[in-house]
Amino acid sequence: MSPALALHAGRHELHARLSERERWLSTAFDHTWDAAVMVGRDGHTRALNRAAQEWFQTTHHLAVGRAVNEWVRLLSVPDRKPIRFPWSGGPVETPKAGCIVHGDGRERWVSYRIVPVEGTKGGITDTFLILHDESWRQQHEQDLGRLHRLEPLALLAGGLAHDFNNFLTAVVGNLQLAKAMVVNADAHAALKDAEAACRAAAGTAKQLLRFVRGGHPVCRIQSVGEVVQEVARFATAGTPLRLEIALDPELALVSFDQDQMNQVVQNLALNAVQVLPQGGTLRIAGRNVVASHDALPVELGAKAGARFVRIDFSDNGPGIAPENLVRIFEPFFTTKPAGQGLGLAVCYSIVRQHGGLLTVTSKPGAGSTFTLFLPSADGPVTPEESAPSPAVKARLARILLVEDEEPVRRLTTKLLASLGYRVTAADDGERAMQAYHEARTAGDEFDVVITDLTLRGGIGGREIAAAIRTANPEARVVVTSGFFDQPLLSEYCEYGFCGALRKPYLIQDLQSAVQKALET
């Protein structure tokens, strides 16, 4: 081969290798998860990858040739001041914290680097701006900060919960007894109002405890769409708000706690009612989404293929100011004069307990959308537990009540007696065990034992149940507690109980628990 042909062949091979390298670099540039923008020395855009186009809602054709400051809104952290090209005036080798603003006003927390590109003859020809999504880290830090702030509150709330619910049990129970005794209509109405106020107080306490301690959901697989339709219609009934519901007929089933999900839907619907006192529209839309196919929040931590139910609650109200939007799920934060600041915080906590996420998007004057993500469930609908029939044993059932709070013990004894049961009360575990063994020896054993979970000093409810079932495997033991979020109250069968009562309980709750135990 002549030198000329050899040189030509060498150049052809070099061009082929360069072309292949260029294609490889172009593919890598275009498919990286980070947003990358190439900026010329004049500050104009020379190239951007797909991630940058998606983040900034633009196209290669619209961005190339424009000054990068015209379409890239980068803010410094924490002062949130605009950063303009050439940003730091030179390379940024160590990633810096920043925040980019999308075209619709949403913000994304990022870390950014500025990497200079040297020309073949030396000197800087272009600059790469590389942005890495840090939203998940920001959310994680916010969650940790929220947990740290709540730790003292959780300890205080947990310590007060038991005593508070004991007091309410005594008050509500005595109000019910008093209602049965009075004949004066005005007195009866006053007692009824007082009872309702106590139950509202118990509900507020539950909201606070559910937020600071999480609560333990009692889940079963069911249709979340049915809950959304029923509760939302009930919450908006009689208001000037127009309700529009559009749920996918094939909406997947979800495993959730019925009471807790009712609370979430009710709070989100009432939130729209409150921001639109003169009327407006609440649109609720639900559909199935799949991670990797649909855009899901990174905070979900969803693996590729994970399936979720997405439900959007969109109102056409005044929207939420940016400074309030970042605090919307904080406890006790509210912009409503009569608000407690617990509703949305509790909703967020409940949804997180179910493995989902609650998010919000809003612009002042353009309404708000609260989006609920819940993991889809496999398997058939879980049947509801059948209610016990009113039939009881022919003879008067005998009940052993174990309660260390004297007002609650006296009150519950009266309630059980009013229902026709024979009651023996004990104020601690040792006296309870003694009474139980004496009754067995005498041949007049107790049909049901009702014990508080937490007793002052010595033996507690769990130990009482274990000891009684050791002596009599057929014994029926019902547990009560003012700590309504105790997992044991939801999984009582695993601890040897046949029923559970959360304080404060009503006379009908007490009757139902005893009847169920008698028929077990």
Image: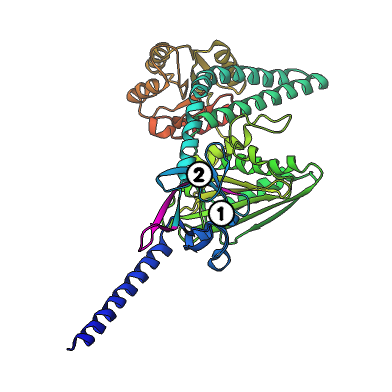
Residue 164: percent from left, percent from top: 57, 18
- The residue tagged 1 is 72
Q: What element carries label 2?
A: strand
Compute the Cα span from label 2 to label 1: 12 Å
- Here the colouring is rainbow
Magenta includes 239?
no
Segment colored magenta: 106-126
Q: Quadrant of residue 249?
A: bottom right
Residue 78: percent from left, percent from top: 53, 36
Residue 468: percent from left, percent from top: 37, 22
Q: Residue furthest left?
A: 1
- The residue tagged 2 is 98
The residue depicted at 58 percent of the width and 28 percent of the height is 208
Q: In which quarter of the image is residue 17?
A: bottom left
The three-letter amino acid code for the residue at tag 2 is: Gly
The three-letter amino acid code for the residue at tag 1 is: Val
Could you tell whether 397 is left or right of 173 in the image? left
- Lower position in the chain sequence, tag 2 or tag 1: 1
Magenta includes 113?
yes
